[in-house]
Image (cartoon, rainbow, N blue to C red):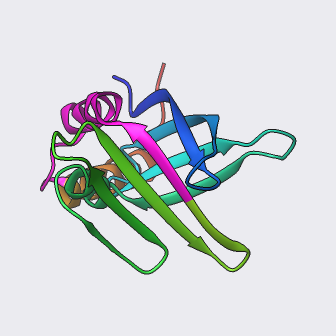
Amino acid sequence: MHSTVQNHLVMNLVVSNELSVRIMVDLEYDAADPYAVRFTFHLPGDDPVAWVFARELLVDGISRPTGEGDVHVHPVGEELSEVCVVLHAPEGDAVLRAATPPLIAFLAGTDRLVPMGEEAAAGDLDAQLASILSTPGCENQG
């Protein structure tokens, strides 16, 4: 059974009202960290930059403005066809836009792996399994 969900997405890095740059973004969800999603941005001429934030923030941000602190997510337009992700960093803010359907597909995959609301149980199961497997006497007797 896979314990991660991965996807790729093209987002637009908004430079100004007149200019945006298309960038590749790797999306990753790992059941070992069931509350978080990782976005790795591949910026032209720079090393990839990864941001980790709450999966619930992305889920909520598809349909309504949400976020506190460094990450804010909100839908764009009346038809909710795009999502805007705003990242606040000491170096400055980044405003990114993406089509909603690929984000929904990614989130659906995460929900199949660890259903929303069951993250605590998933984390506990992993810890329990690790504990059982590390218990003396559980070595392979083959």
**What x and y, as percent, mark residue 141?**
46, 26
Q: Residue at x 48, y 37 (%)?
A: 139
Q: Residue at x 24, y 65 (%)?
A: 65
Residue 110 visible in rendering: yes
Q: Is residue 26 above or below residue 131?
A: above
Q: Residue at x 23, y 51 (%)?
A: 59
Q: Is residue 39 left or right of residue 122?
A: right
Q: Quadrant of residue 29?
A: top left
Residue 136 visible in rendering: no
For the residue pair 50 and 101, the one nearer the viewer reads as 101
Q: Residue at x 16, y 46 (%)?
A: 78
Q: Residue furthest front?
A: 18
For the residue pair 130 and 72, the one nearer the viewer reads as 72
Q: Is residue 23 left or right of residue 111?
A: right
**Stretch in magenta:** 95-118
Q: Is residue 111 above or below residue 17?
A: above
